[in-house]
Image (cartoon, grey):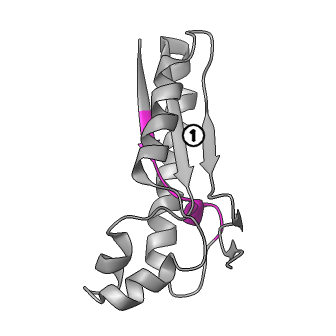
Amino acid sequence: TGHIINISSVAGKIAYANGAVYCASKSAVESISEGMRLDLTEHGVKVTNVSPGAVHTEFSEVRFKGDKERARKVYEGFDPLLPEDIADMIGYIVNAPERVTSGDVVMYAKAQAGPTTIYRK
C-alpha cells in the first residue's frame, strides 16, 4: 500500500508561448502519474497528480532570472493560489478514506478560468 503524489501544473495540460520546455516537462509528470496509476493500483498503491494554476511562489523570479519587478507583475490584479492552498489540498488527498483516490486534481485561483486565462482587476 501507499500513496504517491506528483505535482505537475496546468501547463502540462495546455502549452503556452515561450513555455515549451516547462510545459513538456509538466506534461511528462502527468503521463508518468497516469502510467504509475495503471501499474500500481492493483497493488493497493494510490497515485495522484496535482496540477496547480497560478501559485505565488519564487517560480516567476527564477523564470525571469531574478527580475523581481517582472515577477511581481505575474500576480498583479488577482489573488493567486498560495503554497499553503496546495498543501491543504494534499492534506485532503492523503487523509481521504481508503476507498477514495483523487487521480488528477486541477487547482486554479478563483480569477483563473484556464491555464492561460486570468481575469485581472
Q: Nearer the viewer, residue 103 or 109?
A: 109
- The span picked out in magenta is 5-14
Give the labeled residue for mark 1. Answer: 34
Q: Residue at x 44, y 72 (%)?
A: 22
Q: Is residue 10 magenta?
A: yes
Q: Residue at x 53, y 44 (%)?
A: 50
Q: Residue at x 51, y 87 (%)?
A: 18
Q: Is residue 68 left or right of residue 79?
A: left
Q: Residue 120: x, y in percent?
A: 67, 78
Q: Is residue 13 magenta?
A: yes
- Relative to 15, say whether 95 is above or below: above
Q: Residue 59: x, y in percent?
A: 35, 70
- Relative to 113, say whether 8 is above or below: above
Badge 1 amino acid: Glu
Is the C terminus in the top left, top right, bottom left or bottom right quadrant?
bottom right
- Extreme-left residue of the structure: 66
Q: Is residue 83 left or right of residue 99?
A: left
Q: Secondary structure at mark 1?
A: helix
Q: Nearer the viewer, residue 59 or 85?
A: 85
Is the N terminus in the top left, top right, bottom left or bottom right quadrant?
top left
Report which quarter residue 5 is drawn in.
top left
Q: Nearer the viewer, residue 3 or 93?
A: 93
Q: Residue at x 57, y 61 (%)?
A: 53
Q: Residue 52: x, y in percent?
A: 54, 54
